[in-house]
Amino acid sequence: MPNTEPIEILLVEDNLGDARLAEEALKENKVRNNLYHVEDGVEAITFLRRRGEHAAAPRPDLILLDLNLPRKDGREVLVEIKEDPELRSIPVVVLTTSEAERDLLVTYEHHANAYIVKPIDLDRFIDVVQAIETFWFTIAKLPQVNDG
């Protein structure tokens, strides 16, 4: 039986243009979702640990993570998430402009669930974001985490 609750997505992205595009793509898609956007790695960890202004934040069902972020980069955020027993089961999709083989290897070594290079083409970017959401929430089976 399909879940009727909206999907909780955390977007960690410092480029406001890319964040707006992702938001539009997720609005147009068929899966009901709540998108939360933070602009740097420090705020991402604050959100995930539900501290400060994010004390009431939900536990995300999916994290879309850019690598090149201010204050704490995405590589550090990924390591922190995957080393934390409370957070490690959350799928992390790296969505970045970096095509560097080193970044690809490092993120998979730190247990990223997918690595996607952001397309430069606007329509293709929207297609990619929608495909990520469709895959993770209609095709893949995710663990149900009791968040109480």
Image: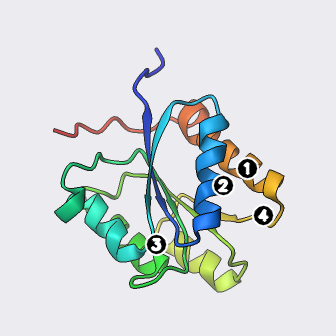
Where residue 104 appears, as percent x and y from the top left, is: 63, 75
Element type at mark 4: loop
Cα distance in 3D space between marks 3 and 1: 27 Å
Residue nearest the observer in this picture, 145 or 39: 39
Q: Amino acid at mark 3?
A: His
Q: Amino acid at mark 4?
A: Pro
In the figure, is residue 86 to the left or right of 61? left
In the figure, is residue 13 to the left or right of 21? left
The image quadrant that residue 34 belongs to is top left
Residue 110 has which mark? 3
Q: Amino acid at mark 2?
A: Leu
User: Mark 2 or 3, which is nearer the eye?
Assistant: 2
User: Mark 3 or 4, which is nearer the eye?
Assistant: 4
User: Mark 2 or 4, which is nearer the eye?
Assistant: 2
Report the residue marked by disc 2: 21
Where residue 26 appears, as percent x and y from the top left, is: 60, 42
CB atoms at circles 1 and 2 under 8 Å apart? yes
Residue 126 has which mark? 1
How packed mark 4 is, by other alpha carbons closer than 10 Å (few <14, some 14-19, many 20 or more), is: some
User: Mark 1 or 2, which is nearer the eye?
Assistant: 2
